[in-house]
Image (tube, rainbow, N blue to C red):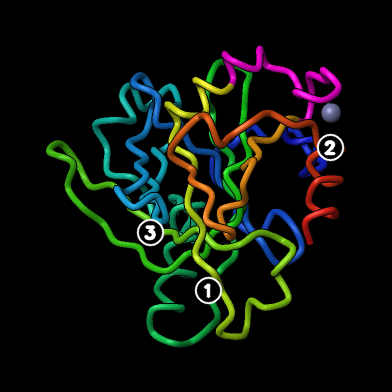
Amino acid sequence: MCQREGVNLQRGMNYRLGKGYSVLLMSIRKNAPYQDEVLEDGTVLIYEGHDIPKTPNIDDPKAIDQPEKTLSGVLTQNGKFHKAAQDYAQGHRKSELVRVYEKIKPGIWSYNGLFRLIDSWVENDGKRNVFKFKLMAIEDEVNKAAHSTLQIHRRRVIPTHVKLEVWQRDKGKCVICGAEDELHFDHIIPYSKGGTSLLADNIQLLCARHNLAKRDNIE
Ligand SMILES: [Zn+2]
């Protein structure tokens, strides 16, 4: 997947991985290790923080509060994202930009687009305290220059079940050239032009090249 990021991502949370943005890997599959959710309207993602790493001293990370700092007092990824969200909420900085990738099947990642980190909190999941991060989907890189202005448009995430349906129908290949790498879920009628994200009928698989070519023709 992450050829795009120029690194092989092992960690789910990557604060300031790139120039001016962070990267989160999410999954809402049934057996996913964390409780990430896309809320009803499809524009908001609630991302769960990550556990303390497993070591010989720690049998069950899921029984321990998710850490904000390491034992030596350095902010963990939870702590870094939390600080960024709190600083934004208190008006001390602009919102952190976050690229989100979603695991839809073993070995298959889909780019869910660009989000703004707008809030964070700690909550009890019934056993221990976990971090939660609230992110809002926004228009992608094409409009990045508009980040500081009011022209930020909300974007709707394609639901996971729709992605799986499209993946199966298009057999994991670009519908134009049959390429099997760097695939994107493309809106046939763009969301900005009223096309829906909620029906497989309006979504197709395109390789990066054909995805870009289409974008250039439309805009
Ligand atoms: Zn193609």
Q: Where does residue 15 sit, x and y in percent of width and height? A: 60, 56
Task: Quickly name the residue at label 2.
Answer: 210
The magenta segment = 167-182
- What separation in Å lies between label 2 and label 3 (alpha carbons)? 32 Å
- What separation in Å lies between label 3 and label 1 (alpha carbons)? 11 Å
Check whether the beta carbons of the residues at disc 2 and disc 3 lie within 8 A of each other.
Answer: no
Task: Quickly name the residue at label 1.
Answer: 95
Q: Residue at x 43, y 22 (%)?
A: 56
Task: Quickly name the residue at label 3.
Answer: 134
Q: Which label sits on residue 156?
A: none
Q: Residue at x 54, y 28 (%)?
A: 103
Q: Callout 2, which amino acid?
A: His
Q: Main secondary structure of the magenta part?
A: loop
Q: Secondary structure at mark 2?
A: helix
In terms of depth relative to the viewer, which is nearer, 53 or 171?
Answer: 171
Q: Quadrant of residue 66?
A: top left
- The question of residue 106 being in magenta is answered with no
In terms of depth relative to the viewer, which is nearer, 192 or 23?
Answer: 192
Q: Callout 3, which amino acid?
A: Lys
In terms of depth relative to the viewer, which is nearer, 215 or 84?
Answer: 215
Q: Where does residue 42 sit, x and y in percent of width and height? A: 39, 49
Q: Callout 1, which amino acid?
A: Ser
Q: Secondary structure at mark 1?
A: loop
Nearer to us: label 2 or label 3 = 2
Q: Where does residue 162 sit, x and y in percent of width and height? A: 46, 29
Q: Is mark 2 within 8 Å of ligand 1?
A: yes
N-terminal label among 2 and 1 = 1
Q: Quadrant of the C terminus?
A: bottom right
The answer to whether one can see residue 22 in this image is yes
Say above or below: 95 vs 52. below
N-terminal label among 3 and 1 = 1
